[in-house]
Image (cartoon, grey):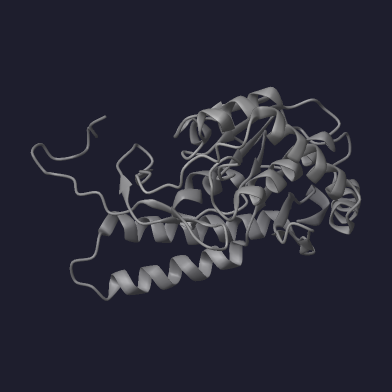
Amino acid sequence: MPHSSRRPGKPYHPKRVISETEDGWSRVEHTAPTRYGSKPVVGSSLPAVDRSLTVQKLLDEHTRCKRQWVESEARRWLQQLLTRQMAEGGWSLNKAVCVALGSPSLSWANRLRSVWQLVMFMDLVDMDADELKLYAQEPRFTSLDKDFLESLGVAVLEPPQAEELADESTLIFIPCLEWLLELPFMLVAEKSQLYVSSSMHWVIDEAERFRNRLAADSKSDTPVLKQCDSAMAAAKAILDTHQENKMPEADFADGHSLALTIYTLKHSDED
């Protein structure tokens, strides 16, 4: 879709593509324009779908992982945290959005990490007193992933639907995403009661480092410089308005670990 603010006839050259790193992060290498500034473009070098999998097998994996998660110290820590920091009257949330889950069905080393992250996301929602509508957005979802998620009651979104859906009444869960792609969610997370991410300190450091490199280049991309500034400002705002709770790293039998940060909105008497 063309941008109304773009000058006629000026070509656009994609700059970044989402790629999966060895530690399970979604990295940005190229983007295409949207009204949010950039849209992820998925490369064609994704691994093949694991043909041994079916929806039932994925459900069995989900059940096994959930059983192990429920008995974990990390889960007990999370329960205690939410009980302690929940506002009087409960959370004022009406939906939950998971972004950058990864594909549970592609043949890559981090496939099961996606299942673990899904288990944590759904359990976090179950800890809320109210029944929330669940959504997930991941451009690498296969048709098998979508059938699997829908069988669990999770509606699948196509980019940038999650960005458009997220607001202050949304539980936002983003386990592993490059800060530039997380920026649209950070801009609304300042008022979100529950925001699960990696680390806002990491975002500030990465955005500042990237901005310094761009600023040293006389041909630097001015819009991207502004995105760096926006990311740093949004991350600092989240740190100012939220309690930062670093989840104890949980290592599971599959060799996968979950290490996230839970941001809970401060009560008025904590300001």
Is residue 220 left or right of 78 when viewed as pictured?
Answer: left
Q: Is residue 82 visible?
A: no
Is residue 98 left or right of 226 when viewed as pictured?
Answer: right
Q: Residue at x 86, y 31 (%)?
A: 129
Q: Residue furthest bottom?
A: 216
Which of the image's four quarters has the N terminus? top left
Q: Residue at x 85, y 35 (%)?
A: 90
The image shows residue 81 at horizontal and vertical percentages of: 86, 53
Which of the image's four quarters has the C terminus? bottom right
Locate residue 198: give its quadrant: bottom right
Q: Viewer-proximal residue, 13 or 215?
A: 13
The image shows residue 204 at horizontal and vertical percentages of: 52, 66
Locate residue 165: give its quadrant: top right
Locate residue 135: give its quadrant: top right
Is residue 129 left or right of 27 when viewed as pictured?
Answer: right
Q: Viewer-proximal residue, 229 or 271?
A: 229
Q: Residue at x 89, y 39 (%)?
A: 88
Q: Is residue 101 visible?
A: yes
Q: Residue at x 58, y 33 (%)?
A: 145
Q: Viewer-proximal residue, 249 or 174?
A: 249
The image shows residue 220 at horizontal and vertical percentages of: 23, 65
Q: Is residue 201 above or below residue 161?
A: below
The image shows residue 21 at horizontal and vertical percentages of: 49, 60
Q: Viewer-proximal residue, 77 or 87?
A: 77
Q: Residue furthest left?
A: 9
Q: Is residue 172 above or below residue 151?
A: below
Q: Is residue 165 above or below residue 13?
A: above
Q: How many marks?
A: 0
